[in-house]
Amino acid sequence: MKAVIFDLGHTLIDYYHDWAGPEERIVSRLYSLATDTGGRTQEPEFRRSVLATLEGNRDLKLQDMLEIPLERVLDRIFSSAGCRVDEGLIQEGMELFYEALKEDRRLVPGTLEMLQRVRDRGCSIGLISDVAWGLPSEYPLRDMKHFRLETYFDDMIFSSDIGLRKPNPRMFKMAMFNLGADRNESMYIGNSLQADVKGAKSVGMKAVLKKSGYFQPDDSIVPDHTVDDWKELDELL
């Protein structure tokens, strides 16, 4: 393989497997922030509106394969609540989302060693990541630096930088182009059948499913290979 390209969340770094609890906490913190900046909406109405917005955005992203930037979402949330909206308020809101994300994050065992083995084989290493809630790419980059991952990557594509979300085939084509590899020389590894495997196979890449606790089955999508422990990847390269 000339190019080995990875997903980030639940593939290299594990996060929450159930997002309902974190989002409830985020909404409570957003409401406190809103009331401190002139918001007039009552908490039950605010909570219903924000949770409905987040759920609706998830559906739109799945349908359109396009990213919805969190900055735009927060601007709408705070404006609707009657807040005094400025860049500082939007930034504070984004930090609340990120702080919730950090509450349960851990490096998937063996990841650093696996990336070094891929590098030692002379492969280029890429990343395609759908960023949680449409956060700017600076936030997943913080996580990558925290776990000392960023130095292994020759190219990184984040949904919030390019406005697309997997399984949009343009993201996978872009990754191959950036790494100078064609589809027969490229492998993609991720934990999602719907986003990762489907996207990779749509452009003719070898698609590898990384087993994860965050998984939605779909018998219509079949990976070329499945790995549980990272050592199993070695024989596929």
Image (cartoon, rainbow, N blue to C red):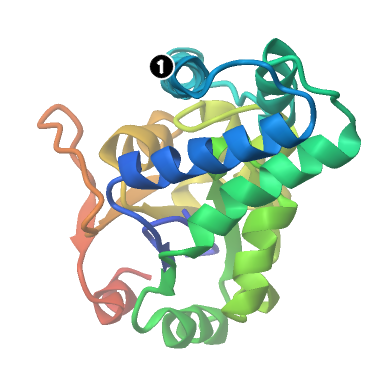
Relative to residue 179, is residue 55 depicted above or below? above
Give the residue pinned by disc 1: 59
Residue name at image x 44 percent, y 55 percent: 9
Q: Is residue 30 left or right of residue 60?
A: right
Residue name at image x 42 percent, y 73 percent: 106
Where disc 1 sits, the SS reads helix
Residue name at image x 33 percent, y 78 percent: 234
Residue name at image x 36 percent, y 49 percent: 206
Relative to residue 184, is residue 60 depicted above or below? above
* Total numbered circles: 1
The outermost residue toward the left is 219
Residue 173 screen position, x and y as percent:
59, 36
- Please say whether residue 155 is visible from this viewpoint: yes
Given residues 72 and 84, the one toward you in this image is: 84
Q: Is residue 153 left or right of residue 216?
A: right
Residue 110 screen position, x and y as percent:
36, 84
- Please say whether residue 5 is visible from this viewpoint: no
Q: Amino acid at mark 1?
A: Asp
Given residues 99 and 142, the one toward you in this image is: 99
Relative to residue 217, is residue 186 depicted above or below? below
Q: Is residue 64 left or right of residue 224?
A: right
